[in-house]
Image (cartoon, rainbow, N blue to C red):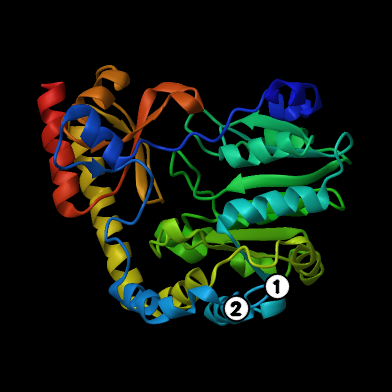
């Protein structure tokens, strides 16, 4: 009987391929009979959740029966204070994914408007565009994975409503100077937004050289996305925010589901913004680990791409698929990039010192 519904499913849904997450720790433990698995595949903070945030969640757990405030005003004020912006510009969401979806549905008319992005890009841009029935155009990155903004601009026309850029980019870790992106934004036609996804901006050095926030007040067509998943280690609580022109923020609040950010995530986010010791230590761990892995991987004959993120992309001197499988057998999960179209490349998240050293030890064994 359920097959009777098939003719009524939208064509965009019938051919839909869902987002493909990285492998899970329990999955690999079970498959290979391992007692310990190191996950270095999903760009998570290797330090785990801050003790300050853990204590905040525990202290507020009794509030779980309450609905959060509509549009999370306390969290929006906290974010605005942290960034020295007007709270009217801030909209919080159930991860950046929700905000990306809302932007597309708010700004684009199916069958008329289009979105422009690089190839490859964060797959959620493409998936949500397709689900919304919106044309999705892509320009190739330069061979070194830097941004070919001239080619990107060629795809923009009068019906382009959004250009998506991830900076620093995933999976390469490349980051473009904010001044370049500001010039690009000034070339976009009226009614077209430049949406810069800064999920990894906290790991770029110096951050002010790469972040678009310094241009936000002057660029009327700029939207900046941020997340609590990376630096603040709250990936499991699903929390992000958008920084938008006031008029766009107002409309987004109108269409956003009223309680998409739960009350514990809201409290955790506020605590995370105050925990400067944790963010300072996280940045130190990532910076030192990024340098260590880059040097050691190069010593093993790998071609390592420069990164301003909390991960490294590299090409091993032997088959990448072989490296990936052999690491799995030893209990280390990294990310193959077949889904991006790069079967010869691998991506590894920066771990703790012990995790990084373990990875290199196993890589030495495998490469020989």
Q: Determine whether 110 is above or below 290 in the image.
A: above
The span from disc 1 to disc 2 (Cα, nearest Å) is 8 Å
> Label 2, on which residue?
80
* Relative depth, front residue between 16 and 91: 16
Q: Position of residue 278 (x, y in %)?
A: 31, 72
Helix, strand or loop status at disc 1: helix
Which is nearer the N-term, disc 1 or disc 2? Answer: 2
Estimate how packed mark 1 is, as few (under 14), some (14 to 19) or many (20 or more) residues with alpha carbons within 10 Å: some
Helix, strand or loop status at disc 2: helix
Q: Position of residue 220 (x, y in %)?
A: 78, 64
Q: Residue at x 24, y 52 (%)?
A: 289
Is any part of residue 229 visible from this angle? Answer: no
Marker disc for residue 357: none
Q: Residue at x 11, y 36 (%)?
A: 361
Q: Position of residue 178 (x, y in %)?
A: 58, 57
Q: Quadrant of the C terminus?
A: top left
Q: Quadrant of the N terminus?
A: top right
* Relative depth, front residue between 80 and 28: 28
Q: In the picture provided, is 16 more to the left or to the right than 155?
A: left
Q: Determine whether 87 is above or below 262 in the image.
A: below
> Label 1, on which residue?
89
Q: Residue at x 29, y 61 (%)?
A: 48
Q: Quadrant of residue 349?
A: top left
Number of residue marks: 2
């Amino acid at each position: 009987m359920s097959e009777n519904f098939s003719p009524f499913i939208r064509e965009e849904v019938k051919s839909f391929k869902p987002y493909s997450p990285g492998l899970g720790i329990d999955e690999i433990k079970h498959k290979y009979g391992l007692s310990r698995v190191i996950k270095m595949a999903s760009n998570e903070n290797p330090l785990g959740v801050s003790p300050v945030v853990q204590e905040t969640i525990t202290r507020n757990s009794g509030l779980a029966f309450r609905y959060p405030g509509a549009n999370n005003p306390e969290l929006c004020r906290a974010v605005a204070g942290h960034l020295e912006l007007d709270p009217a510009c801030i909209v919080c969401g159930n991860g950046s994914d929700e905000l990306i979806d809302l932007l597309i549905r708010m700004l684009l008319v199916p069958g008329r408007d289009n979105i422009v992005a690089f190839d490859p890009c964060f797959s959620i841009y493409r998936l949500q565009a397709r689900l919304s029935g919106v044309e999705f155009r892509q320009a190739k990155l330069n061979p070194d994975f830097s941004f070919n903004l001239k080619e990107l601009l060629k795809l923009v026309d009068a019906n382009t409503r959004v250009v998506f850029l991830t900076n620093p980019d995933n999976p390469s870790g490349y980051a473009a100077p904010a001044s370049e992106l500001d010039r690009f934004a000034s070339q976009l036609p009226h009614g077209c937004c430049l949406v810069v996804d800064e999920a990894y901006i906290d790991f770029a050095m110096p951050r002010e050289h790469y972040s678009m926030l310094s241009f936000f007040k002057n660029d009327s067509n700029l939207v900046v996305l941020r997340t609590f998943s990376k630096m603040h280690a709250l990936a499991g609580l699903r929390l992000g925010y958008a920084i938008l022109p006031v008029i766009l923020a107002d409309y987004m609040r109108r269409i956003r589901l009223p309680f998409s950010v739960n009350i514990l995530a809201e409290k955790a986010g506020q605590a995370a913004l105050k925990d400067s010791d944790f963010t300072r230590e996280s940045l130190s761990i990532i910076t030192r680990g990024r340098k260590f892995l880059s040097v050691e991987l190069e010593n093993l004959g790998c071609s390592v791409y420069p990164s301003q993120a909390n991960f490294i992309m590299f090409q091993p001197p032997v088959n990448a698929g072989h490296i990936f499988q052999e690491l799995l057998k030893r209990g280390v999960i990294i990310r193959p990039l077949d889904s991006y179209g790069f079967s010869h490349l691998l991506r590894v998240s920066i771990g703790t010192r012990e995790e990084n050293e373990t990875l290199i030890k196993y890589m030495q064994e495998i490469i020989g």
